[in-house]
Image (cartoon, helix red, strand yellow):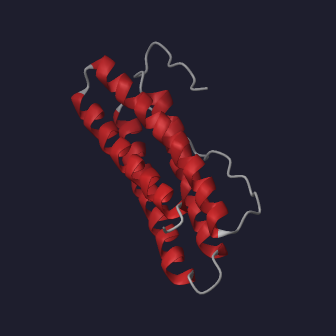
Amino acid sequence: MVPQPSANTHPAIPVLQKIFECEMAGIVRYLHYSFMIMGHNRIPIQKWFREQADESVAHTIAIGEKITSLGGHPPAVSATVAETNVHTIDGMLRESLEFESEALGYYKQLVKIAEDEGDIALDELARGFVRAEQEHHDEVNKMLRSPK
């Protein structure tokens, strides 16, 4: 549940803070996954997980900057990253899909708030993130399919 903003804060700040927490958790999650890849496909998959961690860093920076530009304070903690001990490639990709779906939901909330506020810059920022998250979601879905 996203906390409700106080009367003197921008209504997007609570959602931005949740996104910030999710993206910080993504950094940890994707780095962890990259360490746990074993086997003959290690190099390209490890590289892909590290790229996802880098993308989470970039998203975190952009969101943190937006929070502070709106007068808010980025959280000093991330969302909890559970250690499921699922270290198969398929399992890690499925967990990634769940994580990406959660983040996508928050980004879509941000689009709605930006539209309601008439904040074009925030709307464009949010829509860019929706596109990136949706493309990542689609890519992971493809990775989970068996070749035919």
Residue 61 placed where, x, y %?
40, 51
Q: Quadrant of residue 117?
A: top left
Which residue is nearer to you in this view: 66 or 80?
80
**Number of marks in picture:** 0
Residue 70's spot in the image, x, y percent? Answer: 36, 31
Does residue 102 sit above or below 82 in this rendering? above
Above-or-below relation of 116 to 110 = above
At a point 70% along the width and 68% down the height, the residue shown is 87
Q: Position of residue 92 (x, y in %)?
A: 63, 62
Please tell me which residue is depicted at 37% across the width and 24% down the height of the picture: 112
Residue most toward the top? 7
Q: Does the image show residue 28?
A: no
Relative side of 32 to 121, left or right:
right
Name which residue lies at 76% across and 57% down: 84
Q: Is residue 46 left or right of residue 92?
A: left
Q: For the N terminus, give its image quadrant.
A: top right
Residue at left 49%, top 58%? Answer: 140
Of 109 and 121, nearer the camera is: 109
Please indicate, yes or no, whether residue 52 appears anywhere in the rendered image.
yes
Seen as rendered, the residue at the extreme front is 148
Would you say 21 lies left or right of 48 here?
right
Q: Residue furthest bottom?
A: 40
Q: Quadrant of residue 54?
A: bottom left
User: Where is residue 108 shown, x and y percent of the image?
Assistant: 41, 32
